[in-house]
Image (tube, coloured by chain):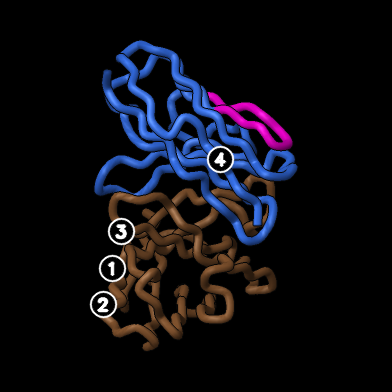
Amino acid sequence: EVQLVESGGGLVQPGRSLRLSCAASGFTFDDYAMHWVRQVPGKGLDWVAGISWNSQSIGYAGAVKGRFTISRDNVNFSLHLEMNSLRPEDTGFYYCAKDMASSPHYSDSNINYWGRGVLVTVS
Amino acid sequence: DIQLTQSPSFLSASVGDRVTITCRASQDISNFLAWYQQKPGKAPKALMYASSTLQSGVPSRFSGSGSGTEFTLTINSLQPEDFATYYCQQVNTYPLTFGGGTKVEIK
């Protein structure tokens, strides 16, 4: 069974940093691209960042580019999101998500598994 | 960035109805489009990828079509469990983007 378990969320002041982690199990982690997606309760989905299986293809939403860094550890089956210079508008639930493809840019790319999410509050 | 515009943003329908949701891209994305369903308090569920390929386990009453800039998600014979919010996502170009969502409610 695929499991994605996020950790590292919490309350942080504007301008500070936070590091989210996601422990993955139940699948061959280094075969698939991974993503972070956030959602403010009651609002829509907001793609934050994605990384290919070998970390060679990485992309960010414009609102976080230069402040957030996505990385993965294929030895320890984990995904990370380093968030710096946090702003109140970064508040929301952050989901760790597994792609069906090895890279986020293939035509069959889509998120087929989601974690339960972790809440980040910037205030 | 590629913008995805979903319409309508809200629709009211009855069990048994046929429902169509449109997703328009601000530039050509070929067939690099996925659809998701989200229910309140739950993580999204993948429905479709490559515009028209059904995810494993998704009922055949769901179908997708389109290429380029215009895409549709159709639900034939709406069931009670289909009342939810639906999102499209383009995976053609970074940054990947989601549409604003379409909430399907019971009439």
Percent of width and height locating residue A7: 31, 74
Is-magenta flag for residue B68? yes
Q: Secondary structure at mark 3?
A: loop
* Pointers 3 and 1 within a single chain: yes
* Pointers 1 and 2 within a single chain: yes
Residue position for label 2: A10
Q: Amino acid at mark 2?
A: Gly
Callouts 3 and 1 close, C-beta under 8 Å:
no
Residue position for label 1: A119
Q: Amino acid at mark 3?
A: Arg
Q: Is residue A73 visible from the viewing direction of this image? A: no
Dot 2 falls on which chain? A
CA–CA distance in space, label 2 to label 4: 32 Å
Viewer-side label of 3, 4: 4
Which tint is chain A? brown
Viewer-side label of 3, 1: 1
CA–CA distance in space, label 1 to label 4: 27 Å
